[in-house]
Image (tube, rainbow, N blue to C red):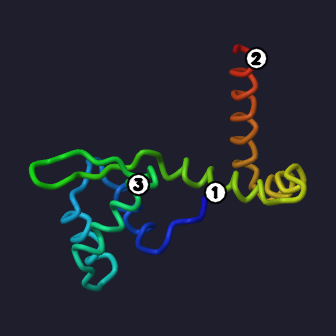
């Protein structure tokens, strides 16, 4: 799974930040303000459709337009990228150990708690 392109990432950032599904017009307005340039409506529409086909955005009909909402959280996207990066390592365990060594103490504690919870759920199933 490759990382998002520049406009894909910008659209996903807006979708993740919103508490409701967005129309292409909404995305266009937000992106034009954020990026300080004039994107074309059709460009944003095309990229939103690409993200829909890739499974990152769901769309629902709203009159003559569609509203787009993310199908996964920003954290899920990051986790998928991390899993792909670990999958490319010759030694996945060594890569994980190096990653864990870069965590600050608070993050390490959170990771330990998450691992304990994952072990508990696996034991129950």
Q: Residue at x 69, y 55 (%)?
A: 84
Q: Earlier in the sequence, mark 1 or mark 3?
A: 3
Image marks 1 and 2: residues in contact by CB distance under 8 Å: no
Image quarter in which the C terminus is found: top right
Near-viewer residue (61 or 15): 61
> What separation in Å lies between label 1 and label 3 (alpha carbons)?
19 Å
Q: Which quadrant of the structure image shows residue 43?
A: bottom left
Q: Which mark is residue 53?
A: 3
> What separation in Å lies between label 1 and label 2 (alpha carbons)?
27 Å
Give the image location of residue 20, x and y in percent: 26, 47
Q: Earlier in the sequence, mark 2 or mark 3?
A: 3
Q: Point out the frontmost of discs 1 and 2.
A: 1
Q: Reply above or below: 115 against 21.
A: above
Disc 1 target residue: 81
Give the image location of residue 26, x and y in percent: 21, 63
Q: Dot 2, how many residues are within 10 Å of its Cα: few (below 14), some (14-19), or many (20+)?
A: few
Q: Is residue 63 left or right of residue 73?
A: left
Q: Residue at x 57, y 65 (%)?
A: 3
Q: Dot 3, how many residues are within 10 Å of its Cα: few (below 14), some (14-19), or many (20+)?
A: few
Q: Reply above or below: 50 against 71.
A: below
Q: Which mark is residue 123?
A: 2
Give the image location of residue 119, x and y in percent: 76, 26
Residue that protrudes farthest toward the top in the picture: 124
Q: Dot 1, how many residues are within 10 Å of its Cα: few (below 14), some (14-19), or many (20+)?
A: some
> What separation in Å lies between label 2 and label 3 (alpha carbons)?
36 Å
Image marks 2 and 3: residues in contact by CB distance under 8 Å: no
- Element under label 2? helix
Residue that protrudes farthest toward the left in the picture: 63
- Element under label 3? helix
């Amino acid at each position: 799974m490759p990382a998002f392109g520049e406009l894909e990432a910008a659209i996903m950032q807006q979708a993740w930040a919103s508490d409701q599904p967005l129309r292409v017009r909404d995305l266009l307005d937000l992106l034009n303000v954020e990026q300080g340039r004039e994107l074309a409506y059709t460009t944003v529409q095309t990229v939103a459709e690409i993200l829909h086909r890739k499974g990152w955005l769901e769309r629902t009909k709203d009159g003559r337009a569609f509203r787009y909402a993310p199908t996964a959280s920003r954290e899920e996207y990051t986790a998928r990228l991390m899993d792909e990066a670990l999958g490319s390592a010759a030694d996945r365990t060594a890569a994980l150990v190096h990653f864990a060594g870069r965590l600050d103490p608070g993050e390490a504690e959170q990771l330990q708690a998450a691992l304990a919870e994952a072990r508990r759920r696996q034991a129950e199933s």
